[in-house]
Image: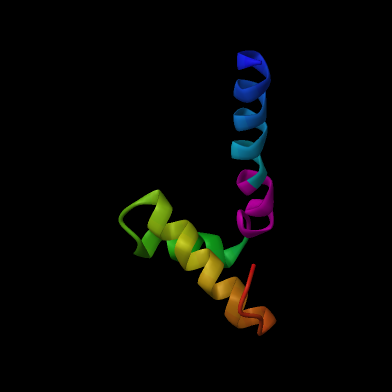
Amino acid sequence: MKKYVITLLLACSALPLTANAALSWGAERNICFKQEKTIPMAYDCLAKKRMTATGSSTL
């Protein structure tokens, strides 16, 4: 059971990484990573740019 829980946690932690894969390339990425001081803030910048570009309120 313990191995199952650990495997499930690892699998769930990998899902957000695949969701952000589309945000990892291009000019928007370069701009955000140059402007922001930390990596999480840069990814937040990318997410915000993505939301405004698609016009949606969720990712």
Taking the spot 41% from the left edge, 50% from the top edge, the residue there is 39
Instruction: Give coordinates of residue 30: x percent, y percent.
Output: 50, 60
Taking the spot 67% from the left edge, 32% from the top edge, the residue there is 11
Residue 16 or residue 3, whichever sits in front: 3
Taking the spot 35% from the left edge, 61% from the top edge, the residue there is 36
Residue 11 or residue 35, whichever sits in front: 11
Instruction: Give coordinates of residue 49: x percent, y percent.
Output: 55, 74
Which secondary structure class fits the magenta region best? helix
Instruction: Give coordinates of residue 17: x percent, y percent.
Output: 62, 45
The quadrant holding residue 54 is bottom right
Residue 22 or residue 55, whichever sits in front: 55
**Residue 1 lies in the magenta stretch:** no
Magenta residues (range): 16-25
Instruction: Give coordinates of residue 2: x percent, y percent.
Output: 60, 15
**Residue 22 lies in the magenta stretch:** yes
Taking the spot 55% from the left edge, 66% from the top edge, the residue there is 47
